[in-house]
Amino acid sequence: MERLQFINKSVLIAAAVCLCGIGINSCTMITGVSNTPVAMENSYSRTGNEVIVKLASIPSLANVGGSVKFILANGNDKPLKIIIARSGTDDYCIFADRCTHGGRELTYIHEDKIMRCTSFCHSKFDMQGNVVGGPAPTALKRYEFELKDNELHFNVE
Ligand code: FES
């Protein structure tokens, strides 16, 4: 990285940290897109509010510690972004992929068993969705599910 690029990046990070510190939502200025793998469209389906995820069709959930994201159409409302993490052999967590601070995407950090916001403020959430760090004001939307026949079934209502 050249010196000027480094200085520009450092100034941007410092500004974001300062704004977070004084309660201004700098996250709205900063793109927060995760590198979580995207599920193939044929690996999930939605009928009404019921969503079915075919685990056999999602390689990134084959091993504990993996995660996947996808977007569900939502009628005339904003599309629903979903993230699923495999936190144990038969343990999965399904969340709305939207930080409650500024709406940025999340990343699953298996080593710490947390969901972390991709924005600079890095809000953190435990696997129940509760805030455990950062400026996020409320818990994540968490979806309860049933695991049957190697499929996750959950309701987005
Ligand atoms: S959007 Fe600001 S911490 Fe997540």
Image (spheres, grey):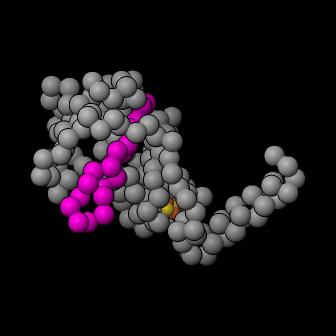
Give x and y (percent) for residue 69: 38, 43
Q: Is residue 18 left or right of residue 45?
A: right
Quarter holding the C terminus? bottom left
Residue 141 sits above or below residue 39 on the image: below
The quarter of the displayed image where residue 26 is located: bottom right
Task: Specify start and end residues of the magenta stretch as a single range.
Answer: 65-83
Left or right of 153? Residue 14 is right
The quadrant holding residue 103 is bottom left
Q: Residue at x 30, y 44 (%)?
A: 94
Residue shown at the point (27%, 24%) measured from the top left: 56
Would residue 105 be seen by someone viewing this image from the given angle?
Answer: yes
Residue 145 rendering spot, x and y as whole percentages: 20, 41
Does 141 appear above or below 59? below
The residue lying at 47 percent from left, 66 percent from top is 102
| Above or below: residue 147 compared with residue 19 | above
Query: Measured from the top left, where is residue 106 in percent x and y?
Result: 45, 50
